[in-house]
Image (cartoon, helix red, strand yellow):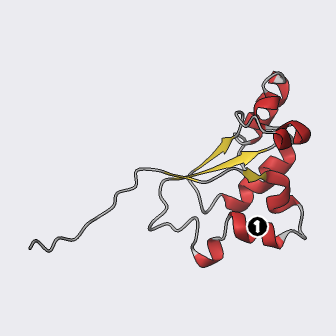
Amino acid sequence: MINAKVRTYVYISFLLCIHYYQMFTDSGNKVYRLSAFNHLLNEEGNPLTDRPLIVQFCANDPGQLLTSALALQNYCDAIDLNLGCPQDIAKRGRYGSFLQDDWELIEQLSQSQLLPHN
């Protein structure tokens, strides 16, 4: 019988899509924040186990996306903007794949993440 320690290697961690408004711009939505990204309990964003970590947001407001991204900047390595979700909720909320015809807004969302924020 061979007694070997099995190691699992994670090359990248990627979270499910987080709704930018419900995450950090709505201060009363603590339940959503804790279920979507609970860094307090090291469920997500643990620097020892969740690296590199990419957080994906669905968004259509550059300022609110920036607020959400800044709140997680110390717990992740990159922010991804969801431009692929085809679900009805994305159509109603005007995000995901339903932004693909609005190149100006996509550029504004992307540029909001490039500015220095110290």
Closer-to-camera residue (29/112):
29
Residue ID at (80%, 52%):
20
In what element is the residue under mark 1?
helix
Other-residue count near label 1 (Cα within 10 Å), few / some / many at <14 / 14–19 / ≥20: some
- In the image, what residue type sits under mark 1? Arg
Closer-to-camera residue (53/85):
85
* Residue farthest toward the front in the current orientation of the protein: 1
Residue 118 visible in the picture: no
Q: Please provide percent x and percent y for residue 14.
A: 56, 51
Q: Which residue is mark 1?
A: 33
Closer-to-camera residue (87/99):
87
Residue ID at (60%, 62%):
75
Image quadrant of residue 89? top right
Q: Taking 116 as reference, is 31 above or below it? A: below
Q: Taking 101 as reference, is 69 above or below it? A: below
Q: Quadrant of the N terminus?
A: bottom left
The answer to whether 96 appears left or right of 91 in the picture is left
Q: Quadrant of the C terminus?
A: bottom right
Residue ID at (85%, 50%):
64
Image quadrant of residue 95? top right
Q: Taking 89 as reference, is 100 above or below it? A: above
* Residue farthest toward the bottom in the current orientation of the protein: 41
The answer to whether 51 appears left or right of 43 in the picture is left
Image quadrant of residue 76? bottom right
The answer to whether 14 appears left or right of 82 in the picture is left
Residue 86 visible in the picture: yes
Total labels drawn: 1
* Residue farthest toward the left in the current orientation of the protein: 1
Q: Please provide percent x and percent y for residue 21.
A: 85, 54
Q: Please provide percent x and percent y for residue 117.
A: 73, 51
Q: Please provide percent x and percent y for residue 71.
A: 73, 61
